[in-house]
Structures are given as structure tokens and as C-alpha cells.
């Protein structure tokens, strides 16, 4: 019983984290348009690496933000693949 509960808790945390990273991309895009304070690229990459890559990836293309940067065009999809692999192995434990 406990085993299935922790898996659902992990799914919930990952989904919420991806919503946060998606919103983070929207905030950064809005700040960029207004020439204001920006979220550091390191922070975005770290957030993506910590299982938030799908939110960052969705935010990139929905808000058309950071899509010209090769580090984002290649790095974020690679991190998303790594996220998928880690989640898969987590669930096969």
C-alpha cells in the first residue's frame, strides 16, 4: 500500500514543479519584453534538470522564449529525455 502512495506523491510533485517552471518561463518572457530583471539561465537549466524540463520546454515554445538560443534548443530537450529516463527508472524500483 505504501509503495503506490509514494509513486503518486512523486508524480504530483513533478507535475507541480513543471507547472512552476512553465510559469517561470512566462515571467522571464514578460520581464524580457519590459527590459526588467530576468531569471538567470543557470536557474532555468537547474530547474529543468530537477525534473522541470517539460514545463520549460512547453514555456519555450508557447511563449516563444529562448527558442533562438542553441543551448536551450538542444539542452532542454536533452534534459527532458534525461528526466524521462530517471522517472522511468524511479517507477521500476
Image: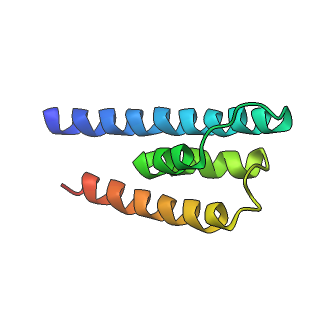
Number of disc labels = 0
| Towards the viewer: 62 or 43 | 43
88 vs 6, left or right, is: right
41 vs 68, left or right, is: left
Which residue lies at the image location 35% right of the left edge and 54% below the top edge?
87
Assign the C terminus to one quadrant of the image. Answer: bottom left
| Towards the viewer: 43 or 18 | 43
- Answer above or below: position of 64 versus 69: above
| Towards the viewer: 80 or 33 | 33
Can I make out residue 58 in this image? yes
Q: Residue 57: x percent and y percent?
A: 62, 52
Q: Residue 42: x percent and y percent?
A: 53, 49
Can I make out residue 1 in this image? no
- Answer above or below: position of 68 versus 22: below
- Answer above or below: position of 63 versus 77: above
Which residue lies at the image location 52% right of the left edge and 43% below the top edge?
43
Which residue lies at the image location 50% right of the left edge and 49% below the top edge?
48
Which residue lies at the image location 41% right of the left edge and 47% below the top edge?
50
Amino acid at each position: 500500500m505504501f509503495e503506490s502512495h509514494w509513486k503518486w506523491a512523486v508524480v504530483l510533485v513533478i507535475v507541480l514543479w513543471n507547472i512552476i517552471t512553465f510559469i517561470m518561463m512566462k515571467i522571464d518572457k514578460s520581464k524580457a519584453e519590459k527590459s526588467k530583471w530576468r531569471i538567470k539561465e543557470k536557474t532555468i537549466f537547474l530547474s529543468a534538470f530537477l525534473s522541470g524540463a517539460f514545463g520549460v520546454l512547453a514555456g519555450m515554445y508557447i511563449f516563444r522564449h529562448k527558442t533562438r538560443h542553441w543551448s536551450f534548443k538542444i539542452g532542454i530537450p536533452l534534459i527532458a529525455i534525461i528526466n524521462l529516463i530517471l522517472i522511468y527508472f524511479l517507477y521500476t524500483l
